[in-house]
Amino acid sequence: MKLQAVFLSAVLASLFIGCQTAPAPCPADSGIVPEIERAGPEPTTPEETEVYEPVPAKVAVAATGLGFSTAPSDATVLFDGTHLDAFYMAQDSTAAQWTINKDGSMTVANRTGNLQTKENFGSMQLHLEWASPAEIMGENQSRANSGVFIQQRYEVQIMDNNDNPTYTNGQVGALYKQKVPLAMASAPSGAWNAYDIVFHAPEFNEAGQKTKSGTLTVFHNGVLIQDHVTIEGIIKYIGWPSNEPHGDAPIQLQDHGDNSRVRFRNIWLRKLGA
Ligand code: MG
């Protein structure tokens, strides 16, 4: 009897370990989030995961942009306009090289690489303000492309899509290559935008299997553009989202490498419990 119980436990354990990738679905009560079933082989080119519909409706916001949002008392302030001490360069952990401006903003220093917070974060409420340049340069994905990578993996797109269409799961406010925003709520080129993001981190068990999907809510200039969406997995430029396990991780701000000249200001977050 005892041996039978051990055998049964082993069988169940092997089922749970294998079910995220095996053809057989995870048992409903395993607590493991099953992989999304997808048709056909995994894409091998970027274009295969670009979508052009739906096209989010344009919502008009204040033409002058928004004012500063003051960090609440319990916030972790990442950038207040005076220094970049909360960040370093993502690729080599050297001092942050982006440019601090006299108006309390900072500008992406082209081809220096992404900025990355020194601290790791889990679930959070994140506020940041960004502006694309008034002087238009580039088109499609090369017009003021930046982004905020939550936990280094989940990009909320930053881009100037005013009269600049692109694939809609890669446009401003998209959860890149995963979720088209509900609306396009950008301020005019050159004016300040605000993102207010609520992120709940995914959870993984000791075997590395996802037991809870991450979720994302985004307000763009006060307009709800991502409504508690389920994050499928780690962003992939080519291919499907994947689900390698991870814990708390830094935030990155993107240097897209094509002279985006995107500015940021007033970046803070509030840590949320699990
Ligand atoms: Mg980007």
Image (cartoon, rainbow, N blue to C red):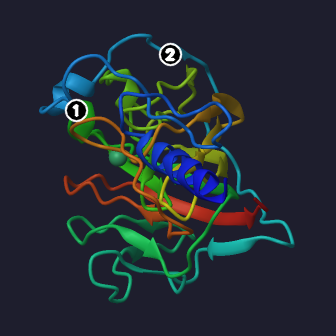
Residue sitting at x 40%, y 65%: 107
What percent of the width, then of the height, locates residue 96?
A: 38, 82
Between 175 and 1, the residue placed more toward the observer is 1
Residue 203 in view in this figure? no
Residue plotted at (42% across, 48% down): 243
Instruction: Kindly identify which residue carries mark 1.
Output: 139
Amino acid of disc 2: Pro
Dot 2: element = loop
Q: Tell me the element at label 1.
A: loop
Please identify the quarter of the rendering in which residue 185 is found: top right
Q: Name the residue under label 2.
A: 56
Q: How far apart are marks 1 and 2 (CA)?
A: 19 Å
Q: In the displayed image of the protein, which residue is found farthest to the front?
A: 1
Return the residue nearer the eye: 229 or 209.
209
Q: Where is 33 relative to 23, above or below?
A: below
Q: Closer to the camera: disc 1 or disc 2?
A: 2
Where residue 198 sits: x, y (%)? 69, 47
